[in-house]
Each structure stands twice: as structure tokens, then as C-alpha cells.
């Protein structure tokens, strides 16, 4: 274990079933395995890092998530190559996922930033980013 590496991220979601459907295929495609599962949540693990999704309690669902408010803006995952970004983009489109900045894709982050940007069911922005050339 290396000091300073991210241990885990825990995200409260508005609809666990919908979020699990979205995140499970993506994280499994990246090599994550289902790590834990319980009535109100589940987690996926890759190496020593895991991502947790927990159902938000009803009493806290009155204000929906928005990435421009204080809090989490987005999650960005490494891709092994530009080809891998292209393959993921096709999978996202096949699944009907909301691709962000399509008019600038795959350079929406700048001419040296090759990535696909998309949203999860709660509109959390997700990036899949190729290493620089």
C-alpha cells in the first residue's frame, strides 16, 4: 500500500438500483469487482481502492444533486489508451448514456486531453481519460 493513494470514495445516490445498473457494468469493464453488497448499498474494488454507493435516506432527497454546488464535481478514471476511450465511448452510446460535450469530443478537456465525458443517473460527471501522447 502506498501512502496517499485514494482508499475509497463513498457516494450517496437517489436511486440505488438505477445507479447500480449504471455503475456496475462501467466499473466491471475497468476491472473492478463487486466487493460488498447490502440492502442500502454496494461497493466495487480494484486493488486497494474501492467505490461505494449508498441509497440516500428519503429525508435527504428533497434537494437533488448538482455538480456545480459545493461537493463532488466529477470522478475521472484513467484509460489505458485513446483506443480504449473510443471503445468506451461506443459502449456508452450503445447503452444510451448521456455523453457530455459531444460537439468537442474527444478533446473537450483541451487538445492534449483525450477523454469521454458522461453522466451517471444523478448527473455526476464521469471522465474516462487517456494518457497523454
Image (cartoon, rainbow, N blue to C red):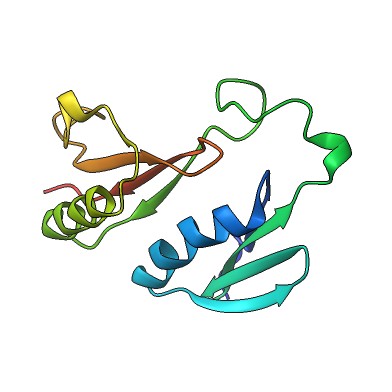
Residue occupying image coordinates x 21% and y 37%? 113
In the image, is 21 to the left or to the right of 114? right
In the image, is 5 to the left or to the right of 133? right
Image quadrant where one finds the N terminus: bottom right
Q: Position of residue 108 (x, y in %)?
A: 23, 28
**In this orientation, does residue 5 appear?**
no
**Quadrant assignment, res 9:** bottom right
Is 93 in front, or is 10?
93
Is 4 in front, or is 91?
91
Quick check: 94 above or below 108? below
In the image, is 30 to the left or to the right of 21? left
Q: Position of residue 85 (x, y in %)?
A: 20, 53
Residue occupying image coordinates x 61% and y 59%? 17
**In this orientation, does residue 127 appear?**
yes
Quick check: 75 above or below 77? above
Residue occupying image coordinates x 56% and y 21%? 68
Q: How many marks?
A: 0
Q: Position of residue 55 (x, y in %)?
A: 74, 53
**Quadrant assignment, res 102:** top left
Residue lying farthest to the right in this orientation: 59
Is 121 in front, or is 133?
121
Quick check: 101 above or below 122? above
Q: Position of residue 116 (x, y in %)?
A: 26, 42
Residue occupying image coordinates x 30% and y 54%? 95
Amino acid at each position: 500500500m502506498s501512502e496517499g493513494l485514494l482508499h475509497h470514495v463513498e457516494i450517496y445516490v437517489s436511486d440505488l438500483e438505477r445507479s447500480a445498473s449504471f455503475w456496475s457494468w462501467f466499473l466491471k469493464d475497468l476491472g473492478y469487482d463487486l466487493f460488498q453488497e447490502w440492502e442500502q448499498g454496494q461497493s466495487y474494488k480494484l486493488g486497494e481502492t474501492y467505490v461505494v454507493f449508498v441509497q440516500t435516506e428519503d429525508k435527504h432527497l428533497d434537494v437533488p444533486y448538482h455538480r456545480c454546488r459545493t461537493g463532488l464535481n466529477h470522478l475521472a478514471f484513467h484509460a489505458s489508451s485513446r483506443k480504449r476511450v473510443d471503445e468506451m465511448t461506443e459502449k456508452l452510446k450503445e447503452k444510451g448514456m448521456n455523453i457530455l460535450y459531444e460537439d468537442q469530443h474527444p478533446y473537450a478537456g483541451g487538445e492534449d486531453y483525450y477523454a469521454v465525458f458522461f453522466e451517471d443517473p444523478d448527473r455526476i460527471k464521469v471522465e474516462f481519460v487517456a494518457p497523454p501522447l
